[in-house]
Amino acid sequence: MDAFFALGQGFLVALEPTKLLFAGIGVLLGTAVGVLPGIGPALTVALLLPVTFKLDPTGSIIMFAGIYYGGMYGGSTTAILINAPGESASVATAIEGNKMAKAGRGGPALATSAIGSFVAGTFATIGLAFFAPLLVQLAVSFGPWDYFALMVLAFVTVSATFGESPLRGLTSLAIGLMLGLVGIDILTGQARMAFGVPELLDGVEVTTLAVGLFAVGEALYVASRFKGNPEEIVPIKGSLWMSREDWRRSWRPWLRGAALGFPIGALPAGGAEVPTFLSYVTEKKLSKHPDEFGHGAIEGVAGPEAANNASAAGTLVPLLTLGLPTSATAAIMLAGFQQYGLNPGPLLFTENPALVWGVVASLFIANAMLLVLNLPLVGLWVRLLAIPQPWLYAGILVFAAMGTVAANPSVVEVGMLFVFGFLGLLMRRWDYPVAPMVVGLILGPMAEAQIRRSMQITLGDPLVFFENPGSATLLMLAAIALLAPFAMKGLSRFRAAED
Amino acid sequence: MMMSLLARRRADKRALVMGLALIVLAIVVERDAAAQTVASTYGIGPTAMPIAVAGFLAVLGVGHFVAAFRDGMPVPEHADGIAIAWIALGLIALLLCIAFGGGFVLATTLLFVVTARAFGRRVLLADAAIGFGLGVSIHLLFSKLLTLSLPAGPLERLFYRSS
């Protein structure tokens, strides 16, 4: 009941004209970057961090959340119309969605993904409002050892469990952790890994790393493979309205997608890819028309699209209640909280309820705005795809330069942007995931602070991590999550040998 | 059969390079930690985490050596080195503009033109105009609306005098 009351208060905050404006800008930007291939919500929020530094914290965070949700909507448009998913979360949508568009059913495909996103996003946001207070109650009793164990679990799942190669994922994480060491040690005031460069004493800026890896790295990568022929856009044919048959076949996948996306998004399972693919496979299994899969089955669009929006809301549960990011976008949003001196976690719910509940309430509003923006106006968004790629990427680089230079106009900072950009290129070419490095940079110093706090409380007894039921369970889960991919690889090799 | 398998499993060069790089990083982190002088009185000090990270990096380096002789790494597509060089040039121009006070607008104009060139465009003047316009509008947005300052050069000073 308390949550209900708090959410009502949140709506009072979220319905203020300025907050509505922030939410509106957020969903517009989010949809635009979702539609444009190559830039996603994580990069956009990273670019906006220095810009929003002096703005109202609640408004800015409402805007970031709007960008996150908007990116999930916009990504589906690109996936359906040009078979180039704007986000990894839309890969599953592209499989059936592009087939539907080519068969002249692009309208219903876009409609089912927008309405499905709305339905799932709304249910998942209700879930967020309901579960967040429960998790906060649990988190109040968490000791530093529990937080440390939780972060170890997040490290492992983000880098090793769900990636293609645990070795390359962990390498990306390790380099992120190493970058997190740079700067002055909080407890003793000593400089670490600064090599006598004064600019490095403040540490490596999350913005610089994210912009370098995501924006500069992506631009270099696309340029290196650019052949001058633009993607073919399938024009939207047919009515945007779904037939009664389409509705009948869509509503169950929407609900199932929401049911898969929300909990998996809330777990440290590395973002939206897992639930979208699970949803796709589930729909394929349950469908009455399995023969249509691969030729444009509407269930294969409805389910994954619902799942990716629900997982975006799910991601916000651990972010708001524990301060634990489980996707790249959430990691950057955490940096957004930190730039205002706010630390997400149980304390934030008691210290600044207006902000937390205002953000939650604004998600409902953002969802409704997105439905309006995406259904009737989809034709406008598609025009964005007509921007020539040279200008698009040149513009992205200009904004990347802006973000870095606005935060800190120094040669060292721009030099780091340069280095991280080429690192991003190398990682894309050699197939190393980028997100674990950003998570490592953000969570590494936090994990170190927690482990040192634990050791101070227990006077240096490392057994506390195993004697405490909470941290012991979490560390055990982390160990399983680390070993599982190797075990499964061994298993599949065994099977391959048997064949 | 056995011979062809062995031939295929010649060491993967990229994995070896990465392994070596990781070992070097591990040594750098460890050396830096070893140079620390202040230790905590109780609990764990500022060197514990760097040493753990160094160990982690070293283990991953060895992991890459093992991978080099087993599965290797995915083979990347052919890359257009000239396009990469153009963008690198643009970033260096940005760096020089910051270092020698060339200002933000000049830097973004250069970066825009050169990136468009990397993507195969050769319409220099039009691109320069777009880059310039973008730079000026961002600069105005920052200085007037957000009251944040971007580095100013001769172009920006000219602009303020006239406005």
Image (spheres, coloured by chain):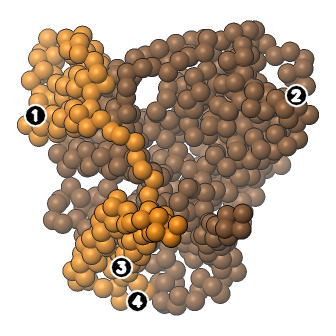
Chain colours: A brown, B orange
Q: Nearer the viewer, residue A477 or A331?
A: A477
On screen, A435 above or below A114?
A: below
- Marks 1 and 3, how far apart at CA: 40 Å
Does dot 1 land on a helix, a strand or a loop?
A: loop
- Marks 3 and 4, how far apart at CA: 17 Å
- Marks 1 and 2, how far apart at CA: 62 Å
Are labels 1 and 3 assigned to the same chain?
yes
Q: Return the disc, 1 or 3, that comes first in the chain's sequence.
A: 3
- Read off the residue under disc 3: B51
- Read off the residue under disc 2: A249
Which numbered disc, 3 or 2, marks the residue closer to the eye? 2
The subunit carrying tag 1 is: B
- Read off the residue under disc 1: B101
On screen, B50 above or below B44?
A: above
Q: Position of residue A382 (x, y in %)?
A: 56, 16
Which numbered disc, 2 or 4, marks the residue closer to the eye? 2
On screen, A398 above or below A185?
A: above
Q: Amino acid at mark 4?
A: Tyr
- Marks 2 and 4, how far apart at CA: 64 Å
The subunit carrying tag 2 is: A
